């Protein structure tokens, strides 16, 4: 019976990584505010937890604690330490530990999950090493196929998110192109080392389809990564092996030639190439360098903390960005992961990462092992080089980090299989020391302790898994409720929107974006109710309650949760601006001073500040703000025309002043005061200039307002 249990556990430990390798490139769910990256993160977390439990059961059944020790261990532990230290001293601990909203990697939580995935796979994946690559190729090819169908305008369904012109299963056109690179290179390598005809045909088709994806979806960064990967593949594969597969080489050469001819001929290029295909917007390398080194100047040792670039960019971006077409884009990722490490982990993180990179070179060098006839070492080595090159040219996300860790884990597992002890070897952990399987004298003499030790190790592992799953449940539930709120808002159901936002805040109160959306919904509902004639006393109390809740939520985000986020101050300013004419001291709060201080070159803050001043009859001050806006936006844009018109209005209007006996903001927040004649509800500012009063419908949570991408679907 015990042997059957061991066989079942071993089978699952080899099967689950195969399923995960297939699912990660294609998995998404439209039930959370963000469909793609968050659900891939949840899938990775749940699967890793299952693998950890299976690993614990295997150790208990085998009556020994085992792991694969590798040359990477010290480097990985040092990087983890830098993540922990930077998170502890982060400018915003919640973002650093759990990820910024909509961007779940890099964070301490996600890195810890990836590290656990690496150790459990490297220690247990043996019989399915080739299968896991086949699964990854299949998932990559399916992802590329879906992206290409959208590229050519073929819709996969009637749902709204399928109608996006650049819908793909990764959530990013750049990531989809990288997945195509990985699929093409792995298929190319394994095809040369495969004797089964059916598998060869599948791999050849995978090469052709993924290369088409690389050609059509890729950017210069992707094409560079593909070229580097191609050179790496030829480096790792033995020359005699390449020369002995002339038929396959001719087939690959034919595919290359066909692509060159197709894209070189104007007639075929016009048919295939979609010049209007939306590309991902990324922060230029030069601007990323400016922000990264500015952060390093202020936080030299540990940086600003993981997942804090969305806070760094508004504070450190150069004024030159206002003269570009991306002047109103809130970037939350730098040009590449190298700049992200520089700004988020500081000098200590850079040093730890450099030490890890040096040790990684030993693993890559091992992949050149010539006596490997399976092609797996060449595939693993090529994968590591491809992902390393990608991180130098683009930023990381959950999927790309998973691919890197998968190649890392399989490389170490292969080192164990090939008995390359300098890279990786299976060891058993004892209470006193590490010892190899052939040298366990301490444990052999203490057989009873040997049986107890797996239980000692299992307890904290199970505890950490339970804690992680509890936190994931809170995160996922909050995202689910926010998605329900968005759907309700789309149907103009303010009551249900309100209820779902309350549930999201109750289950995950640390997310400032939830509180911002809740404040806006409260003001919108208060405005709708106040517009009714002949209000009852109960309705007046309800209006006051809604206003009080909006004020409290906006103060929570700016004073407690995340005072460094300019979006929180903007939301607070909108709430108080809506009270101008209702609360006599609202003018003190309606000023966008804090927003413009945190982000002095942000045109929207000055523009809305100007309109708040207009409502207060402070036309001279409003004129100054509109003049600042005109200096920040390009002269040939609609926003420039709009701000010019508002400036002329401010100049021509006579200064009028008047005051009425009105309650204070503090009174509005704390006592029931009837509100009549409430001004129009304001929703949160968008990136294009928005004049107060132009908004009409209830605005739900502003999803991905800081995204650096052109959405591939209705994402958040």
Image (tube, rainbow, N blue to C red):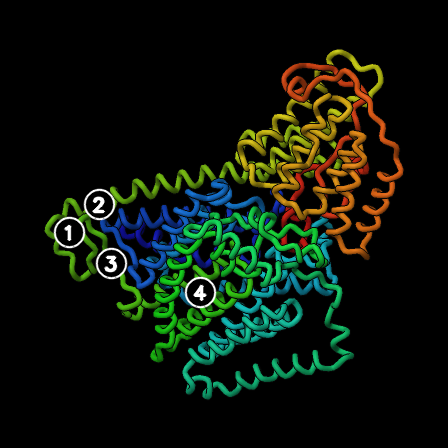
Q: Earlier in the sequence, mark 2 or mark 1?
A: 1
Cβ atoms at labels 4 and 1 below 8 Å apart:
no
Q: Nearer the viewer, residue 677 or 465?
A: 677
Cα gap from disc 3 to disc 2, whole angstroms: 15 Å
Q: Position of residue 497 (x, y in %)?
A: 68, 32
Q: Using the numbered discs, state the Cα–Cα distance from disc 4 to disc 3 in whole angstroms.
A: 25 Å
Residue 712 seen in the figure: no
* Residue beneath the point at 19% across and 53% down: 433
Q: Which residue is mark 2?
A: 453
Labels 3 and 1: the sequence-earlier one? 3
Looking at the image, residue 664 sits to the left or right of residue 184; the answer is: right
Q: Earlier in the sequence, mark 4 or mark 3?
A: 4
Using the image, tell me which numbered label, if any, was put on residue 427.
3
Q: Residue at x 42, y 47 (%)?
A: 86
Q: Which mark is residue 131?
A: 4
Find disc 1 in the rendering and name its residue: 443
Residue sitting nearer the eye, 627 or 562: 627
Q: Are marks 4 and 3 in contact (CB under 8 Å)?
A: no
Q: Is 431 placed above or below 556 here?
A: below
- Check if mark 3's residue and mark 1's residue have beta carbons within 8 Å: no
Closer mark to the observer between disc 4 and disc 3: 3
| Callout 2 secondary element | helix
- State if disc 1 and disc 2 touch (CB < 8 Å): yes
Residue at the top extreme, as displayed: 537
Secondary structure under tag 1 reads helix
Give neighbour class at mark 1: few <14, some 14-19, many 20+ (Cα, 10 Å): many
Which percent across, then down, holds residue 562? 55, 37
Nearer-N-terminus badge (4/1): 4
């Amino acid at each position: 019976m015990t042997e059957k249990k061991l066989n079942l556990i071993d089978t699952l430990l080899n099967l689950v990584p195969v399923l995960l390798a297939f699912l990660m490139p294609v998995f998404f769910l439209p039930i959370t505010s963000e469909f793609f990256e968050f659900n891939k993160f949840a899938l990775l977390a749940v699967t890793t937890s299952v693998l950890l439990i299976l690993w614990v059961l295997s150790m208990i059944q085998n009556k020994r604690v085992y792991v694969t020790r590798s040359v990477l261990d010290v480097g990985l532990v040092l990087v983890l330490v830098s993540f922990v230290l930077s998170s502890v001293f982060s400018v915003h601990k919640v973002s650093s530990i759990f990820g910024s909203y909509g961007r779940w990697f890099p964070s301490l939580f996600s890195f810890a999950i990836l590290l656990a995935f690496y150790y459990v796979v490297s220690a247990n994946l043996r019989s399915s090493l080739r299968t896991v690559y086949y699964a990854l190729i299949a998932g990559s090819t399916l992802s590329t196929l879906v992206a290409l169908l959208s590229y050519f305008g073929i819709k996969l369904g009637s749902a709204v998110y399928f109608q996006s012109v650049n819908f793909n299963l990764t959530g990013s056109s750049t990531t989809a192109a990288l997945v195509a690179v990985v699929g093409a290179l792995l298929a190319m390598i394994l095809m040369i080392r495969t004797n089964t005809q059916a598998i060869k045909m599948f791999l050849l088709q995978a090469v052709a389809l993924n290369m088409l994806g690389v050609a059509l979806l890729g950017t210069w960064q992707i094409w560079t990564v593909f070229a580097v990967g191609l050179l790496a593949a030829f480096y790792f594969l033995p020359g005699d092996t390449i020369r002995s597969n002339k038929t396959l080489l001719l087939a690959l050469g034919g595919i290359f030639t066909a692509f060159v001819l197709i894209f070189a001929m104007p007639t075929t290029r016009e048919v295939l190439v979609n010049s209007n295909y939306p590309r991902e917007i990324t922060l230029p390398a030069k601007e990323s360098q400016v922000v990264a080194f500015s952060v390093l100047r202020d936080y030299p040792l540990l940086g600003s903390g993981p997942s804090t670039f969305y806070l760094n960019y508004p504070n450190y971006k150069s004024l030159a960005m206002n003269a570009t077409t991306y002047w109103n884009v809130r970037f939350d990722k730098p040009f590449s992961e190298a700049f992200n490490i520089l700004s988020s982990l500081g000098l200590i993180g850079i040093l730890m990462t450099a030490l890890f990179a040096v040790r990684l070179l030993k693993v890559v060098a091992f992949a050149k092992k010539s006596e490997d006839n399976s092609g797996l070492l060449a595939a693993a080595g090529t994968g590591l080089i491809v992902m390393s090159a990608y991180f130098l040219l683009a930023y990381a996300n959950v999927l790309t980090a998973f691919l890197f860790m998968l190649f890392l884990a399989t490389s170490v597992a292969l080192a164990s299989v090939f008995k390359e002890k300098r890279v990786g070897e299976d060891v058993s952990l004892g209470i006193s020391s590490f010892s190899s399987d052939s040298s366990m004298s301490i444990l052999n003499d203490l057989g009873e302790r040997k049986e107890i030790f797996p239980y000692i190790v299992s307890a904290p592992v199970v505890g950490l898994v339970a804690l992680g799953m509890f936190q994931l449940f809170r995160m996922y539930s909050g995202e689910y409720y926010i998605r329900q709120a968005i759907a309700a808002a789309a149907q103009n159901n303010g009551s249900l929107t309100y209820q779902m936002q309350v549930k999201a805040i109750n289950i995950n109160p640390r997310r400032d974006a939830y509180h911002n959306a809740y404040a806006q919904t409260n003001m919108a509902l208060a405005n709708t109710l106040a517009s009714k004639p002949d209000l009852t006393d109960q309705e007046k109390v309800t209006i006051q309650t809604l206003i009080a809740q909006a004020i409290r939520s906006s103060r929570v985000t700016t004073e407690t949760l995340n005072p460094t986020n300019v979006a929180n101050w903007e939301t607070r300013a909108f709430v108080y601006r809506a009270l101008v004419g209702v609360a006599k001291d609202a003018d003190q709060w309606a000023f966008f001073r804090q927003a413009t201080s945190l982000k002095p070159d942000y045109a929207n803050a000055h523009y809305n500040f100007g309109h708040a001043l207009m409502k207060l009859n402070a036309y001279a001050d409003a004129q100054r703000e509109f003049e600042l806006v005109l200096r920040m936006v390009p002269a040939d844009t609609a926003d420039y025309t709009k701000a010019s018109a508002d400036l002329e209005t401010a100049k021509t209007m006579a200064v009028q002043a008047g005051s009425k006996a009105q309650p204070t903001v503090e009174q509005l927040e704390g006592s029931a005061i009837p509100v009549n004649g409430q001004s129009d509800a304001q929703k949160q500012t968008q990136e294009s200039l928005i004049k107060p009063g132009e908004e009409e419908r209830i605005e739900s949570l502003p999803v991905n307002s800081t995204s650096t991408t052109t959405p591939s679907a209705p994402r958040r």
